[in-house]
Amino acid sequence: MTAPHKNVPPGLLFEPFKIKTVEALPFSSQREREQWIQDVHYNVFALNSAQVMIDLLTDSGTSAMSDLQWADMMKADEAYAGSRTFLELQATARELTGMPEILPVHQGRAAEHLLFSSLLSGGETIPSNGLFDTTLANIQDCGATGINLPCAEALDPFAENPFKGNIDLEQLEKLLAQKDSKIPLVVMTITNNTGGGQPVSYQNLEAVSKLCKKHKKFFVLDACRFAENSYFIKSREAGFANLSPREIASKCFALCDAVTFSGKKDALVNIGGLLCVRDAALGDRLKNRMLVVEGFPTYGGLAAYSMAAMNQGLHEVLDEKYLEYRLRTISWIVERLAAAGVPVLRPAGGHAVYLEASNFFPHIDRENLPGIALTTALYTEGGIRGCELGTVAFGYRDSHGKHVLPHLDLVRLAIPRRVYTEAHMGYVVNCLVDMHRRRDDFVGFEFLEEFPVLRHFRSKFRKLGS
Ligand SMILES: Cc1ncc(COP(=O)(O)O)c(C=O)c1O
């Protein structure tokens, strides 16, 4: 990264902030952790956060906020209607997205729920580069089906391709051209969380936009990580190096009809989201619906102080120094793991490090849940909490009860924004390298109690041989 001084050691993560408030790390022993994880049947979602030393479960809602965000929270106007804070947020979001209709919501899935329940009536198919689990759940809740059409490069977890978040345009075109298909809209997720936090190129978004116009489809951008995606475009796509992340983001937003946005990622806040739409009549319908399920349109599901923090976060996240540091953090970890032979998804994505669990533990059969073996080992060995996003999260049973496995068996280590330091990340790397060296010592798992939807959140597991 660009060092602010020539004497910054190369490769070092030069954090572009100083720390004003600190929170103690909860230390624990391996023996304690072995007991705690056994008590919750090996599901890390059931642990208390006090039992976790380095929490990489999610990058959602876990950002450290800045002094300016906290200051703006104090200045927020909590009026029920016509709040000054809402008007400020509305101005920022309008300028950034170019969308006139700005609806504040309590988090991303509320935006998804509002939009999809207004546009879908059942029986539709929704194509995407990669639907996040809540997005898919909201589509299914409306009686529609989601279908992911990742580009071919995304199928190889170790291929170094700059835009593995892209959609397969040929497949999309084929689907949209089918006469009897019921496809009202297309969703593009930037970055593609489900596919490894991989970016989508501007060229790919532009092509999707053209296809949507040609086939008269509504184009939705799930823009949780729009700033990270913009910086990837700036640094990897020809012709964008001289544009600012803000200019690139605005160009991307100009391509679509609606934006669903979880502020818990790239607005650097602990709660909040936005639904932005171009069409005034749709905006009106959504506001009427919003009154029933979220709140009055000038506060949505939020306190004004949360809207204030989101407004300031939307400015801070587009700072180039921050984005450079942010993406460098992930690549710093990935480079070290790859050099040590740890099977890590490449190239580095924007918000998380993804490990391929079935490659990490090749001796554990995929039906014996190598991802749960890995999340358990990471926790017991290092006090580190990651998230299984493989067989448990995205697999399911067929009508004969047989496992249907997803293409990749990933474990995600999501990096909270502005929270951990280089020393913490170095510790995570060392734990993983050490575990990988001793990989034959670890055993598989089976379901003890299996939940029907979003299985990773609440299912319970049994360690084989215990
Ligand atoms: C790509 C993507 N879309 C939507 C969501 C849902 O956002 P929220 O958790 O704010 O409801 C998430 C959350 O992680 C996400 O990663």
Image (spheres, rainbow, N blue to C red):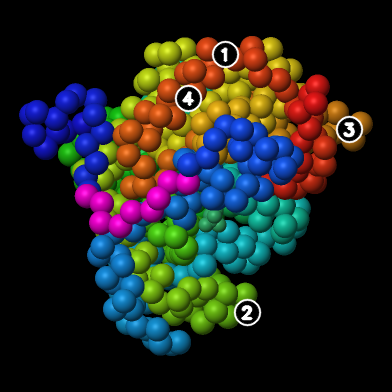
**Element under label 2?**
helix
Considering only order in the chain, which callout, 2 or 4, is on the residue closer to the N terminus? 2
| Bounds of the magenta segment | 18-26
**Marks 2, 1: nearer the viewer:** 1
Could you tell me which quadrant the N terminus lies in? top left
Q: Circle 4 is placed at which residue position? A: 431
Residue in front for this viewpoint, 190 or 44: 44
Q: Earlier in the sequence, mark 4 or mark 1?
A: 4
Earlier-in-chain disc, 1 versus 3: 3
Please name the residue shown 47% across and 18% down the image.
433
Tell which tag, 1 or 3, sits nearer the viewer: 1
Residues at discs 3 and 2 in contact (Cβ within 8 Å): no
Image x and y of residue 193, in percent:
51, 40
CB of mark 1 near ligand 1 (< 8 Å) = no
- Residue at 53 percent of width and 12 percent of height: 437
| Residue 401, disc | 3
Q: Position of residue 395 (x, y in %)?
A: 73, 34
The residue that mark 1 highlights is: 438
**Front of the two marks 4 and 3:** 4
What residue occupies the far left of the structure in this picture? Answer: 6
Rounded to the nearest angstrom, the CA distance separating label 2 from label 1 is 55 Å
